[in-house]
Image (cartoon, helix red, strand yellow):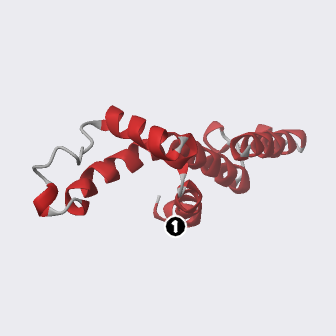
Amino acid sequence: MLFLGCIRLAAGLMAMSRETGESEQRPALNMYSLPVKFVLTACAATVAETVTFPFDLTKTRLQIQGESVPHHFRGSKTVKPYRGMIQTAAGIVKEEGLFKLWQGVTPAICRHIDTLPFIYDVY
């Protein structure tokens, strides 16, 4: 839903910028105003974070699984560590549910959107 809202907002801002005739007066490199660029960049960051977040979560689970298993259980057959990204993701879905793959994506998206003005200043 957030993604569709971003697309609608960006399309509306682009249409408003074209209706005012601003795009004909600018060179091709500066076709959109700064707020439109900001919204489009925020939408791109939202999509990128939403798509890649399950991979980051499974990577983190793989990294910390060795720390969470006590040393005396490491040789035991009862503790089955995850092996590989696909098995980890499938285990998360099976044990916790599909939407747990995206638990915590909102703060990650907010972090990207908060850093956008600084990125524009640097570049």
How far across and how far down the image is residue 36, in percent? 72, 50
How far across and how far down the image is residue 85, in percent? 32, 37
**Residue at image coords 64%, 37%:** 28
Give the quadrant of the N terminus.
top right
Judged left or right of residue 119, residue 47 is right
Residue 34 position (above or below residue 10): below
Secondary structure found at label 1: helix
Image-quadrant location for residue 29? top right
Judged left or right of residue 9, residue 109 is left
Q: Residue furthest right?
A: 19
**Residue at image coords 80%, 41%:** 8
Residue 106 position (above or below residue 13): below
Judged left or right of residue 27, residue 89 is left
Residue situated in front as seen by the camera: 33 or 51: 51
**Residue at image coords 84%, 39%:** 15
Report the residue marked by disc 1. Answer: 118
